[in-house]
Image (spheres, rainbow, N blue to C red):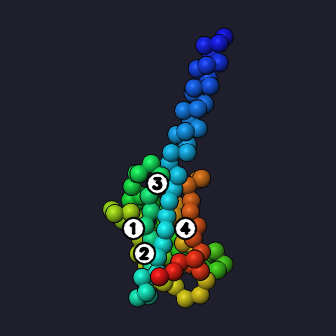
Amino acid sequence: MRKLIALSTLGLMALSSAALAHTPLCSCYDNGDGTVLCEGGFSDGSSAAGVGMKVLDSDGNAILEGEMGDFSEFEFEKPEGDYTVVFDAGPGHEVEIKGSDIVE
């Protein structure tokens, strides 16, 4: 019985550390030329190439959709008005960045 409890505890610890090891990261920067550059990745160092990206208007409607390129970057023309950038690597792995937080 003690071995079963010990193995169960080790299994839960391994699962919880694996879940924490893959946190999504994304930062966006205003290039000052009418474009915005976003860079993404994961806390374990893995690439974000192919991760879905969305730019939403103030009503939550998608005005642009794409994906991170080979170098985990996504560049787009800065929209007028309020907007939000969404790095969407799947459920529990989304990062939302408000346009007002994106500065030069």
Characterize the local packing of mark 1: few (<14), some (14-19) or many (20 or more) Cα atoms within 10 angstroms.
many
Task: Name the residue at 54% across, 72% down.
Answer: 85
- The reply to whether residue 32 is visible in this rendering is yes
- Residue plotted at (58% across, 77% down): 101
* Contact between labelled residues 2 and 3, with CB atoms less than 8 Å apart: no
Mark 2 surroundings within 10 Å by alpha-carbon count, few (fewer than 14), some (14 through 19), many (20 or more)? some
Q: Which residue is mark 4?
A: 86
Residue 62 in sight in this render: no
Q: Amino acid at mark 4?
A: Val
> Which sits earlier in the primary sequence, circle 1 or circle 3?
3
Q: Are marks 4 and 2 in contact (CB under 8 Å)?
A: no
Instruction: Give the SS element for disc 1.
Output: strand
Q: Earlier in the sequence, mark 3 or mark 2?
A: 2
Image position of 24 (left or right of 5): left
Give the residue number, with chain letter if any, for mark 2. Answer: 37
Please identify the quarter of the rendering in which residue 74 is found.
bottom left
Alpha carbon separation for disc pair 1 and 4: 13 Å
Q: Nearer the viewer, mark 4 or mark 3?
A: 3
Is the Cβ of the residue at disc 2 closer than 8 Å to that at disc 1? yes
Q: Which residue is mark 3?
A: 42
Q: Quadrant of residue 16?
A: top right
What's the residue type where badge 1 is placed? Glu
Residue 73 is tagged as: 1
Examine the rendered structure and indicate whether residue 11 appears above or below residue 80: above
Give residue 67's position: percent from left, percent from top: 43, 66
Question: Marks 4/2: CA distance?
Answer: 13 Å
State the quadrant of the N terminus: top right
The image shows residue 61 at horizontal and vertical percentages of 61, 76
**What residue type is disc 2 on?**
Leu
Left or right position of 61 against 36? right
User: First in sequence: mark 1 or mark 4?
Assistant: 1
- 41, 70: nearer the viewer: 41
